[in-house]
């Protein structure tokens, strides 16, 4: 797997090879970033169910200044750290926690929050409720879910701005 665009373009990212994670393919990751703005001028991003960290690392490559990566799987966080280290990314923080615990322990907000929970975690509104207080005033939530998942078209004062399907995966984007 490799980074699609930006200052780290074409560099390789190690995958987790865990049965509990699924990596977002390069092609889909590129399409997601075309949806949310291909490049950024600073800001912060959270990859809440990070896996290998590919989404946050891609955001960093495209101009996000700081990334936070969280995953409940210790091996996934090891891979995230290894990927960031091999790419020379110093503006990254790592947490090995359940997503609810992680969000309860921080008052931070982010400009982009990437959500790619296991498909069996299909409580879309529950996850959005947990994440919502952590979205910055101009923030976006990028949610990868199973194609057949049921999700709200509007959530609090956020509106659905994108909805695309890629094979078995659906990507939805909310914006304040």
Image (tube, helix red, strand yellow):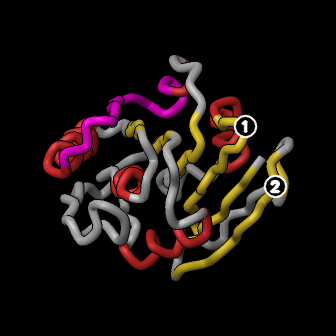
- Residue at the disc numbered 2: 159
Q: Secondary structure at mark 1?
A: strand
Using the image as rendered, state which of residue 39 and residue 83 is in the foreground. 39
Using the image as rendered, state which of residue 36 and residue 130 is in the foreground. 36
Seen in the image, is 113 located left or right of residue 128? left
Horizontal and vertical percent for residue 10? Answer: 24, 71
Look at the image and tell me in which quarter the N terminus lies: bottom left
Horizontal and vertical percent for residue 161? Answer: 75, 64
Q: Residue furthest front?
A: 41
Sooner in the amino-acid sequence: mark 2 or mark 1: 1
Seen in the image, is 91 located left or right of residue 120? left
Q: Is residue 35 magenta?
A: no
| Label 2 – label 1 distance at C-alpha | 13 Å
Seen in the image, is 112 located left or right of residue 174? left
**Residues at badges 2 and 1 in contact (C-beta under 8 Å)?**
no
Q: Which residues are magenta?
A: 88-102
Whether 42 is drawn above or below 164: the answer is above
Horizontal and vertical percent for residue 165? Answer: 61, 78
- Residue at the disc numbered 1: 137
């Amino acid at each position: 797997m490799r980074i699609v665009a930006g200052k780290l373009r074409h560099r390789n990212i190690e995958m987790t090879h865990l049965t509990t994670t699924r990596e977002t393919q390069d092609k889909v990751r590129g399409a997601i970033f075309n949806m949310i703005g291909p490049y950024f001028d600073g800001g912060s991003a959270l990859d809440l169910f990070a896996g290998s960290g590919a989404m946050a690392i891609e955001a960093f490559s495209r101009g996000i200044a700081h990334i936070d990566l969280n995953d409940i799987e210790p091996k996934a966080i090891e891979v995230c750290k290894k990927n960031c280290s091999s790419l020379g990314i110093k503006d990254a923080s790592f947490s090995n926690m359940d997503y609810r615990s992680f969000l309860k322990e921080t008052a931070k907000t982010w400009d982009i929050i990437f959500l790619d929970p296991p498909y069996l975690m299909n409580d879309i509104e529950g996850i959005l409720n947990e994440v919502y207080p952590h979205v910055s005033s101009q923030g976006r939530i990028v949610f990868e879910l199973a194609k057949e998942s049921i999700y709200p078209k509007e959530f609090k004062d956020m509106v659905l701005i994108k909805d695309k399907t890629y094979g078995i995966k659906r990507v939805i984007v909310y914006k304040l």
